[in-house]
Amino acid sequence: MNIVRATKIWLGISSVMVVLSLVCIFTFRYHLGIDFAGGTALEIQVGSPDTYTQTLPAETTVSEYLVTSYKATTSQDAVAQGAGASDRFILRSKAITNNQKNAWITRAKAVLPNLAELQFTSVSPTVGADVVRKAILAVIVAMLAILLYLAYAFRKVPKPTNSWRFGATAVAALLAHDVIILLGVYSLLSHFFGAEIDSMFITALLTLLGFSVHDTIVTYDRLRENLIKRGAVNFEQTVNDSIVETITRSINTTFTLVLVLLAMTLMGGRTTFFFTLSLLVGVIVGTYSSIFVASPLLLLWQKAVDRQKPAQ
Amino acid sequence: MFKKIITISLIVIALVGAVVVDFPSVAKFVGIKKEFKIHQGLDLQGGTQLVYQTDLSKVKSADQANATQGVVEVIDRRINALGVTEPVIQKTRDNSRVIVELPGVKDIDAAIKLIGETAQLEFREGIEGKSLKDGKFNSSNYDDWKDAGLTGAHFAKAEVQFKQGQVAVVSEPEIGITFDPEGRKIFAEVTGRNVGKPLAIFLDKNMLSAPTVNEKIDSESAVISGNFDLQSAKTLAIQLNAGALPVPVTLISQNNVGATLGTETVQKSIVAGVLGLLLVILFMLIYYRLPGFLASLALIFYALLSIAIFIAIPVTLTLPGIAGFVLSIGMAIDANILIFERMKEELRSGAPLISAIDTGFNRAWTSIRDSNFSSLITAVILYYFGSGMIKGFAVTLGIGILVSLFTALTVTHTILRAVAGTGLKNKLSWWMGGVK
């Protein structure tokens, strides 16, 4: 198997994916979660239809009634979404108070007698800015910490390469590839399925920063070992052999993660659906980049350095 | 040999301990009275989380920590009077927020009213020409009155009582207060200065009442009236006893989770977690055969031990926390995969089984260490920057990573060596699953 020879193809696929992702990111706007933008989310259960067929105004659907009565009580425009079960809805609007919510429930109960509140979240818009700031800070700090750690962990890597290149290519694959593609996929999920950028998404993103370098580390670890064994001759062959020797375990370690994430995505319920789905997308993209982006980048870098040397 | 005995005893003790802590029936059987229970977060057991922003604009930066800590203590006393079981009140590191968690509270409105009001009660004297006209009451505007130096801080006790000698069927509630010795002294001076004039009582700058002083009152008790209904009188009495908040607070975020939704979430997460575990075990059996089976035992041990640690610390388990734990199951097996692949390489190059096992473990260690450490870094960062729920995820993921290092390196290794010492060592194909 010669993976390195097709470097241009792998990096080509990645570039196309990254460009497409960037297009998506800037074309579709993300829905912001209420912990970022502020607002209210009220999850309710309306009960079975025969409890309200008599009381619900003619030619009005339940969700239409929910929205109009909500507006009448709280004077906020709301959006009603289905929430898993057929008798469950989530109403989203600008932030309302607990009192306003109670007033609306009392009013709506006249029409929907079995109406029950399942969850009420209300966040003032001032909170958002702080959360966004912290999220961006956390991503930057995580990147730097991983870069520093990798440079340290691979400090004994022999020539011709050096440990900073190991760290830099691993983090480059992470940032320029994994993060951007995940953001691109998530913009589609946000646009078409209502996924939101919220604390959970940022958590998934940060978790992936840690995960995605796992496979890169395994490959680089083997590369280090092979470089020590064989010396600096034929760097390209050594890189390729290291990838080939570790590709099975990279795929298998990812596969076990995919299994648990699939189980959680399909069975874990609505609250964590997009969280586990983005982790799922992220670990697959991350494994691709570990095998097909990080090491080829390292090799390209080495070639560029080699070309410069005779010129000096 | 000695080292081996220690390792095996350590594993056995951990396993027995984990089983006792995890299964209440086992704990009961061995005679442990203490009830071990997973501490569930609000999103799982149902309850309300309130987040307050503290207004520190008028507080010197050196005193901000104290002021916010004061807010926490006052809110704690107020909630205790409400009789909530296991409330959690904490401030954020930067003192800007106070987070109040109330499991199972039904009347959230009452709780919000009780917690969020500053409840600064002040006695104020009249100013002729502004609040007073010819010694008579003229204005209820806070700024038209001047500080009398007597506040709720001088009360020893406050309680709800009913207006004495009232003929009406529904008697009006009022607050009976008892001054501390200094409060009694100030009250005597203030009433002495203001005989024949009104003395105003303000709550958070709103006038409650302005009774006219008939004579100097040198008594440790007094009565505050102010058109209370029973509920608001009770609330105020609790607030006065708990003390005023040192700085004003604003409610910026609220989250109520109904108990039904919480229970559903727990059930779904358990199903997802068990399914994930089974899928991983199935894969390991098919692909890695005998070592895969042994690793699966280690994985189950890993799950039991992690849950026992969550109970023992205790870690408050939230929905993201469960997700972090299930995720860590998928990661915990990774170390085994790396080791087994390495082991197979050694076997292929003709190494004897035991030495292949040992080499597999030793050589795989650096990459296992480095990759887990990078995940630990992100767990720490998540814990540091994250809010409550996210912290829960970071904690279970972090604990999961540490425990998985222990089980993969110690437990799997020990079991593998033990099994390799039996007749199974000759069935090489059992050890070489997946080798082409």
Image (cartoon, coloured by chain):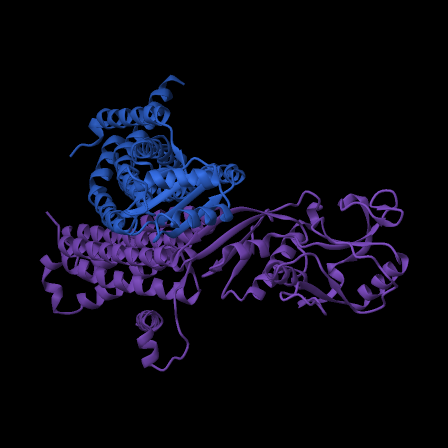
Chain colours: A blue, B purple
Tell me what residue is drawn at x 40 percent, y 66 percent.
B311
Is A302 located above or below residue A248 in the figure? above
Is B59 located above or below residue B267 in the figure? above
> Which residue extends farthest bottom?
B31
On the picture, is A304 further left or further right than A242?
right
Compare residues B245 and B65 and report the one nearer the observer: B245
Dividing the image into 4 quarters, which one contains the N terminus of chain A?
top left
Total marks shown come to 0
On the picture, is A98 further left or further right than A172?
right
Is B403 located above or below residue A106 in the figure? below
Tell me what residue is drawn at x 83 percent, y 62 percent.
B187
Compare residues B115 and A194 and report the one nearer the observer: B115
Compare residues A117 and B247 and report the one nearer the observer: A117
Tell me what residue is drawn at x 63 percent, y 55 percent.
B71
Indicate the position of residue A101 as horizontal and vertical percent values.
Answer: 46, 47
Dividing the image into 4 quarters, which one contains the C terminus of chain A?
top left
Compare residues B280 and A233 and report the one nearer the observer: B280
Instruction: Indicate the quadrant where residue B290 lies.
Output: bottom left
Q: Is residue B41 visible?
A: yes
Instruction: Indicate the quadrant where residue B154 lies.
Output: bottom right
Indicate the position of residue B259 as horizontal and vertical percent values.
Answer: 38, 59
Indicate the position of residue A39 as horizontal and vertical percent values.
Answer: 46, 40
Indicate the position of residue A208 as horizontal and vertical percent values.
Answer: 35, 42
On the picture, is B95 further left or further right than A246?
right
Q: Is residue B387 visible?
A: no
